[in-house]
Amino acid sequence: MADGNQTLMAKAEARFADKQKKTAERNKATAEYMSEARAREIKTAKLRELRLAKEEADRAAEALNPSPKKKRAPKKA
């Protein structure tokens, strides 16, 4: 009977250790995912800021030096 209890106890400990290992792996994967998502958000915000600054600079340059508008050629009948 003692062998049976030890076998059950060993199995239970093995299952518990396996669950702990899976939980640790899941937490690590979640942390990596969240870290990558945050880095992506920061990069996106920086790129958006650069794009908006460039667009504003382009608008200011266009206001100072407007490009001549092209005239349409008259249609021939």
Image: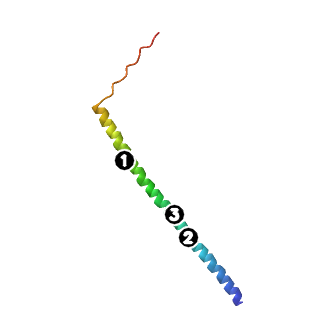
Residue at (68, 84) in percent of width and height: 7
Q: Where residue 30 sits: x, y (%)?
A: 51, 63
What whole-number distance in Å separates the C-alpha atoms at marks 1 and 3?
29 Å
Q: Which mark is residue 49?
A: 1
Secondary element under disc 3, as helix, strand or loop, is: helix
Q: Where residue 77 sits: x, y (%)?
A: 47, 9
Residue at (38, 50) in percent of width and height: 46
Say whether residue 40 is left or right of residue 52.
Answer: right
Q: Residues within 10 Å of mark 1 (few under 14, many from 20)?
A: few
Q: Point out the image quarter for the N terminus.
A: bottom right
Disc 3 residue type (three-letter): Thr
Say whether residue 72 is left or right of residue 10.
Answer: left
Secondary element under disc 2, as helix, strand or loop, is: helix
Foreground tag (2 vs 1): 1
Disc 1 residue type (three-letter): Glu
Q: Where residue 39 sits: x, y (%)?
A: 44, 56
Residue at (36, 47) in percent of width and height: 49
Q: Which mark is residue 30?
A: 3
**Disc nearer the start of the sequence (1/3):** 3
| Mark 3 and mark 2 residues within 8 Å of each other at the beta carbon | no
